[in-house]
């Protein structure tokens, strides 16, 4: 099972009726490397980014699955 971590920073870079680009930083709970992700949130999930949400990512250094909590 993937470990969870909390985003150290996240920002909605652009948003329209088709979706949103969200940038986020997090420290990998396995290798502790500082990661950066730019993710696309589809139109059907736009309401979820108004509150706390989670996203599944893979660490670029160790390759392990990570669940990132964005608050």
Image: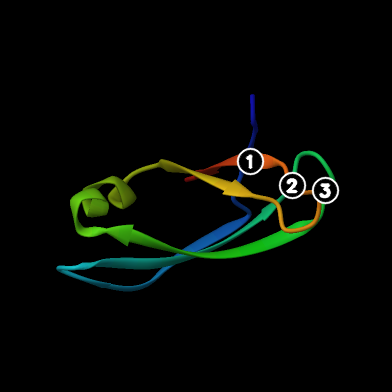
Choose the circle earlier in sequence order: 3 or 1. Answer: 3
Q: Quadrant of residue 67?
A: top right
Residue wearing tag 3: 32
What residue is shown at x 74% (from left), y 48% (from top)? 63
The answer to whether the residues at label 2 and label 1 have Cβ atoms under 8 Å apart is yes
**Between 21 and 12, which is closer to the camera in this rendering?**
21
Residues at marks 3 and 2, CA–CA distance in whole angstroms:
5 Å
Q: Is residue 27 above or below residue 25?
A: above
Q: Which mark is residue 66?
A: 1
Pinpoint residue 69: horizontal percent, then vertical percent.
52, 41
What residue is shown at x 51% (from left), y 60% (from top)? 10
Choose the circle earlier in sequence order: 2 or 1. Answer: 2
The answer to whether the residues at label 3 and label 2 have Cβ atoms under 8 Å apart is yes
Residues at marks 2 and 1, CA–CA distance in whole angstroms:
7 Å
Q: Is residue 40 left or right of residue 32?
A: left
Q: Is residue 12 above or below residue 47?
A: below
The answer to whether the residues at label 3 and label 1 have Cβ atoms under 8 Å apart is no
Q: Is residue 27 above or below residue 4?
A: below
Pinpoint residue 23: horizontal percent, then vertical percent.
50, 67
């Amino acid at each position: 099972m993937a470990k969870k971590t909390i985003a150290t920073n996240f920002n909605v870079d652009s948003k329209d009726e088709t979706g949103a680009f969200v940038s986020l930083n997090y420290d990998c709970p396995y290798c502790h490397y500082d990661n950066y992700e730019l993710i696309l949130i589809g139109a059907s999930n736009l309401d979820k980014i108004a509150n706390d949400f989670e996203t599944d990512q893979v660490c670029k250094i160790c390759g392990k699955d990570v669940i990132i909590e964005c608050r």
